[in-house]
Image (cartoon, rainbow, N blue to C red):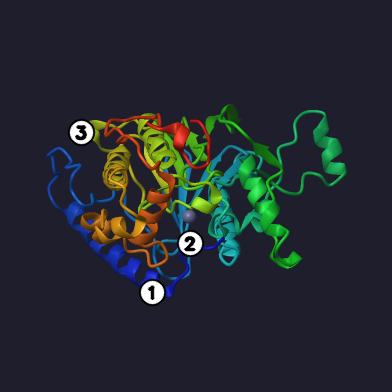
Amino acid sequence: MSHRKIPALAVLATLVWLSLAATAAVRAQGPVDSAAPDSAAPDSAAPASAVNADDGQIHPQFVQGNVWLMAGEPAMSNVAVQLAGEGVLVVDTGTRAMADELLARIQQIADEHPSPEGPPVIRLIIDTDSTADHIGGNDLIAKGGRTIVAGNFARDAQSQGLDTAATIIANVNLLAHLVAYNAQVPQDQQVTLPENAVDADVYDTHFDGEALQLFHPHSAVSDDDTMVMFRRSDVIATGDVVDMTGYPHIDVARGGTIDGELVALNKVIELAVPEDKQEGGTMIIPGHGRLCDQSDVVHYKNVMTIIRNRVQYYKNQGKTLQQVLALRPSGDYDARWGLNPDWTPRDFVEAIYETLPARGPSFSMRNETLVPASASITSGRAF
Ligand SMILES: [Zn+2]
């Protein structure tokens, strides 16, 4: 369930962050670069300052509109917080260990932005992924808020004590994974389950004056992902579909596939609208790492598509997994994207190999939201 908890990674990620921060500082002081962004560059600088720091704290960073990013230690999962009017919406709840700190930081922002009724209260939580570093704080964060109880039911609910926790929403497959997980662990380690499990995209939800859209990529890093678009704030929280710390963590055992991942990345690109010169505009909060804009995700998608197509090319020649690994199809990108010790380039290539058909076409490098060989996806799902 858990990943990305190795201290060595934290040290490494800190070094990466320090270099990114230095780059950002130089950029901030230097003249405005009017050249078009180079999408083939190994990495592009953050459109906003990265705030991950290896200090055991959570650092709130204002994104835009009504959305904040709660960035924890480097490589730990990001938490998005939408705050307007009387309510707070939280996307992902981080690790259990950091939940108290997260709640305190959310409360701090809520206190700083009171409505006429007082500081807004946590009412809604959306889980984007079933790994322990995304749902670990479900219990504590939910208890820090209340559900929205409408109209006539409000008084009844209050008198019956039904409004004591925020509502957790997630994809129905996430609920299934957590039910299975809870059945295997002692009660004190069990995770609070979402009570609102949805099995399709949701386009018609409003929260505190903002239209929300929930997208379920069918088999991306897993089969339980949700991506959240804040339409008014123009922010997308992608969960682990986008991971600025490394290759996407495609968990084949949980239904993840490379082609589903590429479809999901293309969906993010389709939803995002860049501002001037392909930078800015829609802000994208990845599952891990720094804030992105559309051009960052285009670059990420291109790298993953190239590696995927190489693996398919070799697989079409009848090469075994070991032969493909020996050819290092991700080799030229590993220095930027292959640094997670618990999700190595070999792990990534293996997940690609396992979820591609024995013979199949290339994935288009254009913004393609259809899988070229959907019938051959191992999960058997159609897109
Ligand atoms: Zn994650």
- Residue type at numbered disc 3: Lys
Residue at left offset 71%, top offset 45% = 146
Q: Disc 3 marks which residue? A: 277
Instruction: Nearest to the eye among marks 1 and 2: give it.
Output: 1
Furthest residue in direction top, as rendered: 204
Say whether marks 2 and 3 touch (CB < 8 Å): no
Cα gap from disc 3 to disc 1, whole angstroms: 38 Å
Give the camera-side residue of 53 and 261.
Answer: 261
Instruction: Nearest to the eye among marks 2 and 3: give it.
Output: 3
Dot 2 lies on which element? loop
Q: Count residues near mark 1 (Cα–Cα under 10 Å), then give few for <14, some for 14-19, many for 20+.
A: few
- Residue type at numbered disc 1: Ala
Residue at left offset 56%, top offset 30% = 201
- Residue type at numbered disc 2: Ile
Q: Disc 2 marks which residue? A: 58
Side (left or right) of 114 relative to 34: right
Side (left or right) of 101 relative to 331: right
Pinpoint residue 123: horizontal percent, then vertical percent: 66, 43
Q: Is mark 1 within 8 Å of ligand 1?
A: no
Residue 186, visible in the rendered structure: yes
Residue at left offset 29%, top offset 32% = 364
Q: Disc 1 marks which residue? A: 8
Pinpoint residue 56: horizontal percent, then vertical percent: 48, 70
> Within the image, what quadrant is residue 324 found in?
bottom left
Dot 1 lies on which element? helix
Give the camera-side residue of 95 and 248.
Answer: 248
Cα gap from disc 2 to disc 3, whole angstroms: 32 Å
